[in-house]
Amino acid sequence: MNLRRDVFQALADPTRRSILLLLASQSMTAGAIASNFDSARPTVSKHIQILSECDLLKKDRKGREIYYELNVTKMKIVDDWMNQFRTIWQNRFNNLDQVLLTIKKNEK
């Protein structure tokens, strides 16, 4: 059964974020991914399953091995959504800079 999970719920877990960082540079098997963690392999496999269910990972079968890689298309969608907040906060920081400059000028 392939459940569709919420991407942001998947990203909320630090182990899953670490898996994504590992896969950002190269594709890896589940065993290779698990070797980077102190958790049991089934625990890491469950994290991989959750990331796959929300399309953050793609699978590539090579012989008997399955290699996991980052789904950059899905990550771009997440980044686009997050960019709204970057823009809002950048505008707020810029406004704060202006207020602080005005206060500093008035103190002189």
Image (cartoon, grey):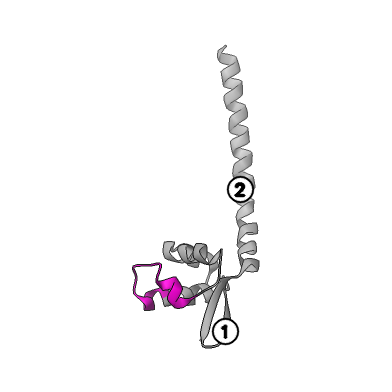
- Residue 45 in the image: above or below residue 98: below
Q: Which mark is residue 106?
A: none
2 and 1 marks in contact (CB < 8 Å): no
- Label 1: state its secondary structure: strand
Looking at the rendered image, the disc whose residue lies closer to the viewer, 2 or 1, is: 1
Q: Mark 1: give few (<14), some (14-19) or many (20+) Cα within 10 Å.
A: few
Question: Which amino acid type is marked by label 2?
Answer: Arg
Q: Which residue is mark 2?
A: 86
- Residue 108: tell me if it is visible: yes
Residue sitting at 47 percent across and 74 percent down?
Answer: 48
Residue sitting at 34 percent across and 70 percent down?
Answer: 39
Q: Position of residue 70 (x, y in %)?
A: 57, 69
Is 40 within the magenta?
yes
Task: Pick whichever, 58 or 67, lies toward us.
Answer: 67
User: Which residues, given as a range, are shown in magenta?
Assistant: 29-44
Task: Pick whichever, 35 or 78, lies toward us.
Answer: 35
Query: How far apart, in angstroms, are the residues tagged by discs 2 and 1?
Result: 39 Å
Q: Residue furthest front?
A: 63
Q: Mark 2: give few (<14), some (14-19) or many (20+) Cα within 10 Å.
A: few
Question: Which amino acid type is marked by label 1?
Answer: Lys
Q: Which residue is mark 1?
A: 62
Task: Pick whichever, 16 or 22, lies toward us.
Answer: 22
Is 55 within the magenta?
no
Q: Residue furthest top?
A: 108
Quadrant the C terminus occupies: top right
Q: Position of residue 78 (x, y in %)?
A: 60, 62
Q: Position of residue 45 (x, y in %)?
A: 43, 77
- Residue 13 in the image: above or below residue 98: below
Q: How many marks?
A: 2
Q: Position of residue 2 (x, y in %)?
A: 53, 83
Q: Is residue 50 left or right of residue 89?
A: left
